[in-house]
Image (tube, rainbow, N blue to C red):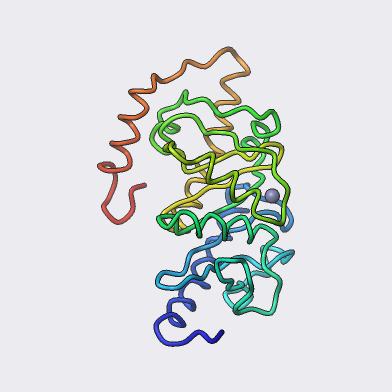
Amino acid sequence: MTVSGDVARTLRELREEVCALHAELPRYGLVVWTAGNVSARVPGADLLVIKPSGVPYDDLTPENMVVCDLEGTVVEGDHAPSSDTQAQAYVYRNRPAIGGVVHTHSPYATAWAARAEPVPCVLTMCADEFGGEIPVGPLAVIGDDSIGRGIVETLDGGRSSAVLMQNHGVFAVGRTARDAVKAAVMCEDVARTTHLARQLGEPTPIPAELAAQLFERYQNVYGQREDRS
Ligand SMILES: [Zn+2]
């Protein structure tokens, strides 16, 4: 497959954006070694841009990002794509509104995943960003679309932009790759503070109706139009 014209230009920009967004994962303490990844859907094409497999974060460049089709087959790139490509391709195939997916094993959120316990909605930040608890998805094997199916089925019908895949880690989604990175950062922060609160007693839940109102306000009213953060 040859990529040309507008799509080629979009791809150049997305390679740079996805590469730059990867720097946010170690910066916020969400990943170690080569674990974790960011991907973006390519607007106007059935393609995605994702991290190469096994390449250290310091060695990531726009050029070594990998372009795949939505079946996970490499279209452009000299490296093998992330081992999570099938999972992310499944999400893009099945949820057209999702434009970015991020995966981390960020420690506090993953500690909740290890217990298969949702992060309860006890902080306004959790309500703002996730609209309620951060749910747990199934224990699923890596490499085929089981993880992708688990992500889609767990997030369906809810407001959360993050799912704790049981015994594994975080998958966060967004309209753009940047939104998905933000959700991954917020997920870890909420998981950490809720964990700390638990050490001293039982945190007080935010009523579901109020969580829904906070979510609505934050997603639609709060912040600048271009960047609600
Ligand atoms: Zn993983």
Residue 42 or residue 186, whichever sits in front: 42
The image quarter containing residue 127 is: top left
Question: Taking 161 as reference, is 199 above or below it?
Answer: above
- Please give left or right for residue 34 compared with residue 30 in the image: right
| Residue at 67% in and 45% down | 105
- Please give left or right for residue 214 compared with residue 39 in the image: left
Residue 207 or residue 190, whichever sits in front: 207
Residue at the top extreme?
201
- Please give left or right for residue 104 compared with residue 211 in the image: right
Question: Taking 133 as reference, is 89 above or below it?
Answer: below
The image quarter containing residue 210 is: top left
| Residue at 42% in and 87% down | 5
From the top left corner, tell me how far across and down residue 22 is, in percent: 58, 60
From the top left corner, tell me how far across and down residue 183 is, in percent: 48, 45
Quadrant where the N terminus sits is bottom right
Report the number of numbered marks.
0
Question: Taking 167 as reference, is 21 above or below it?
Answer: below
Residue 135 or residue 189, whichever sits in front: 135
| Residue at 49% in and 55% down | 94
From the top left corner, tell me how far across and down residue 52 is, in percent: 67, 68
Question: Taking 6 as reference, is 202 above or below it?
Answer: above
From the top left corner, tell me how far across and down residue 110 is, in percent: 66, 37
| Residue at 69% in and 28% down | 115
